[in-house]
Image: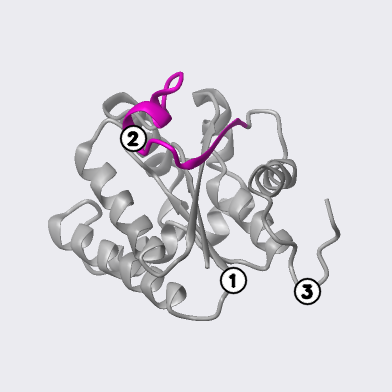
Amino acid sequence: MQLVVIFGPPAVGKMTVGHELAKLTGFKLFHNHMSVEPISDIFEFGSPPFGRLVNEIRRRVIEEVADSDLPGLVFTFVWAVDDPDDKELVGSYAEIVRSRGGQVHFVELSADLAERLVRTTSEFRLEHKRSHRDKEFSRGLLIDLDANYRMNTEGDEFEQRLFPGEDYLKIENDHLSASEVARQIVNAFDLPPSCQGARPL
């Protein structure tokens, strides 16, 4: 089993790229809001019980996929790269896969704030992330997260400080389509084509 972790700031295109990557490889997509939305209907976003339950859902899904005969999973995540707790959390997800003999690949996406603010209103994003259909809330959350957290690495920081020696790719996707980014990921990690008819790259 292969786990592709796509991380980066809100509205950078993680889910959209993940969707395209899943089509190319046949991997299943488990995007951030598949765990966030059900719990946000019960507990306030960011509250301690919200965080515990979202993490438990993610962990259990990754465990079940790693124990199955599915070829891979694309997992998207907003990662505060300067937060040791986030590093430990991401590491624990990766270890689930590694402990079962699987492979883990990290993909970091980056785009400037102006471009990401435009993307907050895309139809595809709003279709799958109902908590962001309140455009004022979504815009405010994005700006607040940008002001208070680091969600992209700088230079060779990933290899030196976060997970040395890992399969890692950083893509600036301000002006790239999601399908172009997905193809770069497939080529970089030599991911297998979908058995459902994806054409060779």
User: From mark 1 to mark 3, how far is it between C-alphas?
Assistant: 13 Å
The three-letter code of the residue at mark 2 reads Leu
**What residue sits 31% from the left and 24% below the top?**
147
The three-letter code of the residue at mark 3 reads Gln
Residue beneath disc 1:
71
Q: Secondary structure at mark 1?
A: loop
Looking at the rendered image, the disc whose residue lies closer to the viewer, 3 or 2, is 2
Q: Secondary structure at mark 2?
A: helix
Task: Residue 171: give x, y in percent of width and height.
Answer: 60, 32
User: Where 38 falls versus 8 (above or below)?
Assistant: below
The three-letter code of the residue at mark 1 reads Pro
Q: Residue placed farthest to the left in the image?
A: 48
**What residue sits 24% from the left and 47% below the top?**
88
In screen coordinates, is 10 left or right of 199? Answer: left
166 falls in the magenta region: yes
User: From mark 3 to mark 2, how far is it between C-alphas?
Assistant: 35 Å
Task: Residue 124: give x, y in percent of width and height.
Answer: 62, 54
Task: Residue 161: give x, y in percent of width and height.
Answer: 32, 29
Instruction: Choose between 30 and 99: the one closer to the eye.
Output: 99
160 falls in the magenta region: yes
In screen coordinates, is 180 left or right of 87? Answer: right
Contact between marks 3 and 2 (CB within 8 A): the answer is no
Residue beneath disc 3:
196
* Bounds of the magenta segment: 153-172
Q: Badge 3, how many Cα within 10 Å: few under 14, some, many 20+? A: few
Q: Earlier in the sequence, mark 1 or mark 2?
A: 1
Q: Secondary structure at mark 3?
A: loop
Residue beneath disc 2:
162
Instruction: Choose between 116 and 28: the one closer to the eye.
Output: 28
Q: Badge 1, how many Cα within 10 Å: few under 14, some, many 20+? A: some
